Every structure is written in C-alpha cells, then in structure tokens.
Amino acid sequence: MPRIIIAGAGIAGGYLWQLLGKRGVSPGDIEVVDPGSRTRCGIPSCGFATTRQFFPLCREVGLDPEKYILASPDTGYANGIKFNIKGRIFSIDKPAFIRDLLEGAAVNSSPGDMAVERIIDATGTARAYIGKYEHDVLYPCIQKKVEFPHPPALAEYPHHVGYSWVIPLEGSSAHVGIGSNTYNSETMKKVVESLSQGAQTICGCQGFIRGTGPILPLVQGNVWAVGEAGGLVD
C-alpha cells in the first residue's frame, strides 16, 4: 500500500516523483494520480517559460536541462519597451520534460486507498485535495500554440487586471495567450488573434491562471500543496 499519493502528473507532480526516488523512497510507496488533461496536447498548456533555476533543478533529479530548452531570447518587449534578457529566460519542451519526469511512474486516473501518510496536492489551480481558497484570484485564460512565418520575439503586454504574452518555442512557433479578470471571452479572443496575426494555429485551449500566491497555509493535516496548487509558480 502506498504511503504517499502525488495528485497531479504535471511538472510539479512529476518532479516530486523523481525527487522522492532520488532521496530513497521506494516506488511502491508512491502513487501518482491524474485524471488526464482535456487539452489537445494532453497537458495543462501554461508554463513554457522558465528561468536559470531550471538548470540545477533538472540536474538534481538526473535530467539534462539542455535537452528541453527550445529558445533563449536575447531581447524582449514589455508594454512596448525593448529590454535585454539573454541567458535569463528560457522556453522548454514541456511535454517532453513531463514525460521524462514521470519515467517509471504508473499514473492512475483515480486514487486507491486514501489511508496514506501524506497526500501531495500538485493539481494546480484545481487544488483538488487541499481545498479551495476563498480569496484566490483565478484569471480566465485563452491561449494558443501558433506557427509564425519568422521566429517571434518574446513579449508581454499588461492589461487591466491581467496580461497577454508571446513566448517563442521551437523554430518559428510560439505560445500566445491572455489572462484577464476583466475582459470577456470575446475581447480576449480578439487580443490573442491580434498577437498571432499572420500565424497558423496549431492548437488552442481555455482555462485559468492564478493571480495570487503563495497561498498559505501550504499544509492542512496530511495534505501538502506544491507548485501551482500553492500559488508557487517557480
């Protein structure tokens, strides 16, 4: 019978699976649970951008960070202002990273015996096990993966209670999206269409991104929140 349930098979849950194994916890003592994503790519689609902290964290669980780097822009734009960012922001192949993190894990769609020592809630904005937080702010979000004729530039655009972005991925593709707590869905769609003008859509989805964090407490009884479930994006 497992001693630990990891709820959520994304980056946070997958990383924890690898880390516990490296720290000597037997795979038989861990159960990974995830009902699966409804997105076309099979994963929650935010979280393609990361910082230099990605490198030591990868190495700590025996993975080569260079394998997952898709782009490292030299410059970017924020609210129309150009800035230098070389070596500070990276975009990653998130699906490949998650697959490698979960190597050796049997991911179940629902938990077995709930009488365990600890439940790790890595379910992101769902907070499926640690429970909802009444003051939590979740922005409705519309996002797409697109292919531009030429490699795009990294860009972020502040909006009233929210922001939109263009994150370069492999080749000429990019992750484009907006999260806003004041715009309606039609307005957000127009923003995304404007940011991806001239590009071919590969896939798209809707969801939520968090506007608050960290959310305390991170521990309630035998349930611990990690990653986005605790508002801890990094």
Image: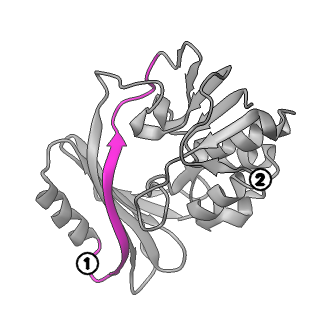
In the image, is residue 212 part of the stretch drawn in magenta?
Answer: yes
Counting residues from the start of the chain, the first of labels 1 and 2 encountered is 2
Q: Which secondary structure, mark 2?
A: loop
User: What is the total number of numbered labels drawn onto the structure image?
Assistant: 2
Q: What's the magenta region?
A: 196-216
Up the image or down, 138 lies above or below 71; here it is above
Residue 28, position as x, y percentages in the image: 80, 38
Name which quarter of the figure residue 64 lies in: bottom right
- What's the colour scheme? one colour
Q: Where is residue 49? Give x, y as percent.
A: 51, 55
Q: Position of residue 103 (x, y in %)?
A: 74, 55
Placement of the C terminus among the 4 image quadrants? top right
Q: Which residue is mark 1?
A: 197
Point 48% across, 37% down: residue: 228
Q: CA gap, disc 1 to disc 2? A: 41 Å
Relative depth, front residue between 96 and 150? 96
Q: In the rendered image of this protein, does residue 77 appear above or below residue 218?
A: below
Q: Using the image as rendered, state which of residue 27 and residue 156 is in the foreground.
A: 27
Horizontally, is 157 left or right of 97 in the view?
A: left
- Direction from residue 34 to residue 105 in the image, left or right: right
In the image, residue 34 above or below residue 49: above
Residue type of the residue flagged with mark 1: Gln
Q: Is residue 140 magenta?
A: no
- List the residue tagged with mark 2: 104
Mark 1 vs mark 2: give the one in front: 2
Where disc 1 sits, the SS reads: loop
Q: Do the CB atoms of the residues marked 1 and 2 lie less than 8 Å apart?
A: no
Q: Residue at x 49, y 52 (%)?
A: 47
Identify the residue at image location x=21%, y=70%.
194
Q: Quadrant of the N terminus?
A: top right
The answer to which image quadrant residue 61 occupies is top right
Q: Position of residue 179 (x, y in %)?
A: 28, 49
